[in-house]
Image (spheres, helix red, strand yellow):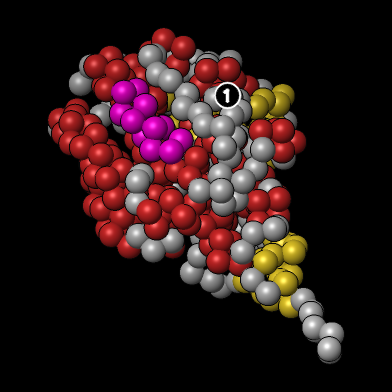
């Protein structure tokens, strides 16, 4: 009887592929349909944003960091502002902190909606994408109301906010929060017990709790494996310790568990948004009163010389930051993210280095893919929610 011939096949998946959430290349070695090895190749989208920040004044860095992870823009700018404010030794007013909490949680919902819609579409649930983008459009409308921009508002500033909340902001956010829980129920009706979705996600892309810790994974990926870590609880910032919310976890560590965690996170974010909205008066202080950093309040009278100095410092030269280094992490939609900021005492950063959760997730891709089927590679990539702009900085 002739010997059965077996051989492996090496194939490229990407870098241009509709299911790689950006420009990601995977070199897969296959035995039939089983993946024997997977080597992620990154760098195709490299923007040089971290290096570019060294040529910008401190406030000018904000539009750059928002474009690293374009689905968590305001979480990025928040993390950068917190690190610079620590170097400056300043703390923004309570109302400003509450506004930042509200915007960060709306951004989390926004990001998770994009994830759920695209992930559902990739495993065959096309309708879910249409549902999720319907709600996401409302959040983009809120951004436009707030700052005039939909995707990259650049509304947060070192020292506070760009300007006060617009009229109608509270009503728009409240209308969204009132309607959104029912929309979450719709998503769950479509997916949670859907037989096809269960077969595509349960037991797929499994990573253990120990491996999640070893790979430095955080956010929904780690919490789906049982790692009970959330920056908002472990290292509270913006007064998160005064808010009532839970950190959802699962134990199986598969794609379905990551879906469950993100759905539960959106419900917790709605709770946080409601609490923050109740704390925020429609008008009030939106930035620190410090002429070195922020423009003067409109109700304060300045002499002509003071006004000239203020204009020169803020709008022409920017402000200087004392020499030193700082890192203040936040809990972004994909886990802990932050910016290690180094100042040499000038009006520009000496170094800005980000902690990108998407890069760490890409590290663990091989662990999640090897041993599974090539058809499951799509479900795994979708479930970890990588944004390649966050990987290739």
Camera-nearest residue between 181 and 371: 371
**Residue 30 image position (x, y, % from top left):** 71, 71
Q: Using residue 327 as the reference point, say whether residue 90 is left or right of it.
A: left
Please provide the residue range marked out in magenta: 260-272
Residue 228 visible in the shown view: yes
Q: Is residue 138 magenta?
A: no
Q: Is residue 343 left or right of residue 49?
A: right
Outermost residue toward the top in this view: 242
- Image vertical order of residue 22 relative to residue 260, above or below: below
**In the rendering, at what x and y percent does residue 382 appear?**
50, 55
Quadrant for residue 146, please give it.
top left
Task: Check if residue 264 falls in the magenta segment.
Answer: yes
Q: Residue at x 51, y 48 (%)?
A: 202
Q: Quadrant of residue 1?
A: bottom right
- Determine the secondary structure under disc 1: loop
List x then y, in percent, for residue 282. Answer: 20, 21
Category of crowding for the residue at label 1, using alpha-carbon neighbours closer than 10 angstroms: few (below 14), some (14–19), many (at least 20): some
Which residue is under mark 1?
228
Q: In terms of depth relative to the viewer, which is nearer, 120 or 135?
A: 120
Taking the spot 38% from the left edge, 38% from the top edge, the residue there is 263
Position of 223 with respect to 302 (left or right) is right
Instruction: Name the magenta segment's main secondary structure.
Output: helix
Return the x and y of residue 290 as percentages of the image width and height.
Answer: 45, 18
Residue at figure coordinates x 33%, y 62% from the top left: 126
């Amino acid at each position: 009887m002739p010997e059965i011939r077996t051989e492996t096949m090496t194939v490229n998946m990407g870098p241009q592929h509709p299911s790689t959430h950006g420009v990601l290349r995977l070199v897969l070695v296959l035995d039939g349909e089983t993946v024997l090895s997977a080597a992620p190749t990154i760098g195709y989208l490299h923007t040089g944003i971290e290096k570019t920040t060294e040529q910008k004044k401190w406030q000018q860095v904000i539009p750059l960091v928002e474009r690293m992870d374009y689905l968590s823009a305001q979480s990025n700018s928040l993390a950068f502002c917190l690190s610079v404010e620590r170097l400056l030794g300043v703390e923004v007013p309570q109302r400003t902190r509450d506004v930042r909490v509200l915007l960060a949680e709306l951004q989390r919902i926004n990001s998770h909606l994009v994830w759920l819609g695209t992930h559902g579409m990739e495993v065959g649930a096309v309708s879910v994408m249409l549902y999720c983008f319907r709600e996401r459009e409302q959040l983009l409308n809120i951004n436009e109301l707030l700052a005039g921009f939909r995707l990259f508002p650049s509304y947060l500033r070192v020292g506070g906010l760009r300007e006060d909340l617009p009229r109608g902001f509270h009503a728009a956010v409240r209308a969204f929060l009132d309607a959104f829980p029912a929309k979450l129920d719709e998503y769950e009706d479509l997916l949670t017990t859907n037989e096809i979705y269960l077969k595509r996600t349960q037991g797929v892309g499994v990573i253990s709790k120990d491996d999640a810790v070893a790979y430095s994974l955080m956010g929904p990926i780690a919490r789906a494996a049982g790692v009970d870590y959330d920056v908002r609880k472990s290292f509270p910032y913006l007064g998160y310790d005064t808010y009532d919310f839970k950190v959802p976890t699962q134990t199986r560590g598969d794609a379905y568990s990551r879906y469950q965690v993100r759905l539960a996170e959106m419900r917790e974010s709605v709770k946080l948004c409601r609490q923050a909205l109740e704390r925020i008066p429609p008008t009030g202080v939106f930035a620190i009163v410090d002429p070195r950093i922020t423009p003067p309040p409109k109700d304060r009278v300045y002499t002509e010389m003071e006004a000239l100095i203020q204009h020169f410092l803020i709008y022409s030269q920017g402000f200087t930051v004392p020499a030193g280094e700082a890192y203040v992490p936040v809990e972004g939609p994909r886990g802990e993210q932050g910016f290690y900021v180094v100042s040499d005492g000038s009006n520009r950063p000496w170094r800005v280095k980000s902690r990108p959760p998407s890069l760490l997730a890409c590290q663990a891709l091989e662990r999640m893919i090897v041993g599974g089927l090539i058809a499951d590679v799509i479900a795994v990539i979708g479930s970890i929610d990588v944004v390649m702009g966050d990987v290739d900085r």
